[in-house]
Amino acid sequence: MSDKKTIEELIQFFADEYYEKLYYFCLKKVSDNNEAEDLSSDIAISIIHELRKGTTPRSFSAWVWQIARNKYSAWSDKKRRKLNTFSERDIYSLEISDESNLSDSLVRHEDIKLLRRELAFISSDYRNIIIAYYIEHRKIQDIADSLNLPIGTVKSKLSRSRNILKEGIEMAREFGVLSYKPENIGFIMNGKSGKNGEPWSVISKKLYKNILLAAYRTPSTAEELSIEIGMALTYLEDELDFLEQGEFLRKNGKKYETNFFIVSANAQEKVYTHLSAIQPLITEKIIALIENQVKSFDENGYQWHEGYQPYEDMKWEILMSKIDEVSLGVLSDINKNKTASVKANLSKYGHTIRPNGGEWDLLGMEEYNGEHPCFVGLHGAGVGKPEDEEYINFGQFKFIFKEIENKTPTNLTYEQAKALAAAAKNNTEEIQQRILDELVGYGYLEKTDGSYKPTFRVTFKEKIGKLNAEQAANHDKLYYEAYNIAKEHYNFCREVIYREIPEFFKDDQYQIDHACANIFGMRGAVLEGALEKGYISYADNDERKMLGAYLII
C-alpha cells in the first residue's frame, strides 16, 4: 500500500479490505453473531479514530490486527465485569421490525423506549442508514445505491451509528436547561422586513429564540442542540435548515453559530449603570441644545414647524431626534473607516441584504430584570433623499412608557406617509378615501370643514433657514458638549461588548459595530431625565396620542 494515501483514502481502504475480515475474527472469538458485529464495530471505530488523528503505521495489516487483539482483550474483560448489566447487551437485540415483536421475551418495554429515544437524537445521515439496515432489513448494496454512496461509506456510517446508539443507551442522558426552562430574548431590529415579515415572524417564536440562544452561547452540532433544547433531531433538523437559510444561524463545519450578537444580562447591567450615572448631564446638554436652537429659529423669524401641535407635545419628538442627532454624529465618526468589503454587503441604507427582499440587522438582548431606562424605538416610512423634490421623512418614536406605544399603530406604509405629506400641503384630492380614513382613525390626521390636517410636528425643509454665525457657533459649542459625553459612553459600551465577544465573532467587525451602536442607545435615559426635570410631563390619565411623531418634507 502506498504511503502517499490521504486519510480518507486510508479509511476507505480499511473499510473495503478489513471490515469483513474483522467480523469473522470477532465471530471466532465470541461465537455470537450480534456480539461479533458489535465488537467489530468497536474495533473499526478505534482504527478510524487513529487514522483521523494522523497515525501512519509502517505495516498497515500488523497494526490493524494488533488493535483488534487489544480491543478484544479489553472487551472480554469488560464483558466479564458487566455481564448482567443492560449496557453490555447488544443494542440490536432491542430492535423491532413491526409491532408483533413487542411480545418477544427478549424485549422489555423500557428497552424499546430507550432505543426510540436514541434514534430520535441521531442525525439523519446515520439514522436513515441504521433504520434501513436493521429495521427495514435492506441490503447494504441497496442502501448504497439509494443514497448514491460507496459501499465502504455505508459500512463506516453503519458502524459509527451503532456505536452512537450504544453510547446513548448506556449513558444517563441529561437534557439541557433550555429543554425545560426556556429563556426569553428581546431584539432590536434595524432595517426593512422581508416579504414574509422576517425577522419578526421568526424571532417571536420561543423555539427559535432558544435555539439561537444555545448556538450563541456554545456553537453546537445539530445533535448537541437537540439535547440542549430537548427536541428530537428528526424534527429539529428542519428548523435548523430554516434558520440557516434565513441567515439567523450560520454553519461552521458541523457546528451551528448564531448569526448576530446577543448581549448578556451582565453586560446590560454594566451599560445601564454607566448610563444612569451620565443621565442628568447628557439630558441637561440635550435640553440646552434644543432650547438654544428653538430660540435662534424664533429670533430669525423661521417657520421651523407648521404649528399643528403644541410645542410642549413636540418636545417629546424633538428630544429623541436631538439625542439621535448627537448619537449618530458619534457613530458616523467611528464608522468613517468602514471597509469597502463590509459596505459591499449592505443595502443603500446601510443594512445587511437578506433573503426575501429583507434589509435588516438584529441585536439580541438576554432577559434582564434589573434597573434600566425605558425603551424607545423608532418606526418610519421615508421616500427619496433630502435633496429630492418628493422627499418625505416620516417617523414615530415608540415610547415603552405608561403604554404610550399602544396609542399609535406599529408602523405606517409608504402610501400612508405620502398621504400625510399631501395633507400637510393641503392637496389630498388624489389620495384614496380609505387611506385618509385610516389616518384619521389612527389620530395622525384631523378632519375639519372637509379638509385634512396633521396633528403632529410637520416641517418643510425650505422654511427652516440657517443660523447666523454667532448662533451657529453657540449651537456647535453645545452640540460638542453633548457629543463628548455621548462619545465617552459609547467607548464604555464598546469595552463591555469586547469583553464578551464569542470566538466566532472576533473578526466580524460589522457585527461588533452593530452591537455597540445599539447597546449605546440613550433615548430612554434622556426621556426619563427630561421627565424628572419637568421639561416634559405625562400623567397616568393622559390622553395625548401623537407624542413622538414628525414629518419632514
Image (cartoon, rainbow, N blue to C red):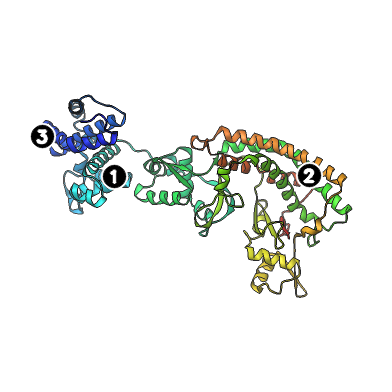
Q: Is residue 39 left or right of residue 426?
A: left
Q: Would you say residue 321 is visible in this rendering?
A: yes
Tell me how far mark 2 sits from mark 3, CA to CA: 88 Å
Residue 407: x %, y % from top left: 67, 59
Label 1 sits on a secondary structure element that is helix
Vertical arrangement, residue 441 with respect to residue 526, above or below? below
Residue located at (75% from left, 63% from top): 455
Q: Is residue 298 left or right of residue 118?
A: right
Label 2 sits on a secondary structure element that is helix
Q: Amino acid at mark 2?
A: Lys
Between 434 and 425, the residue placed more toward the observer is 425
Residue 16: x %, y % from top left: 19, 38
- The mark lying in front, picked from 1 and 2, is 1
Q: Which residue is mark 1?
A: 126
Q: Amino acid at mark 1?
A: Tyr
Residue located at (48% from left, 49% from top): 247
Q: Which residue is mark 3?
A: 31
Residue 104: x %, y % from top left: 16, 47
| Label at residue 533 | 2
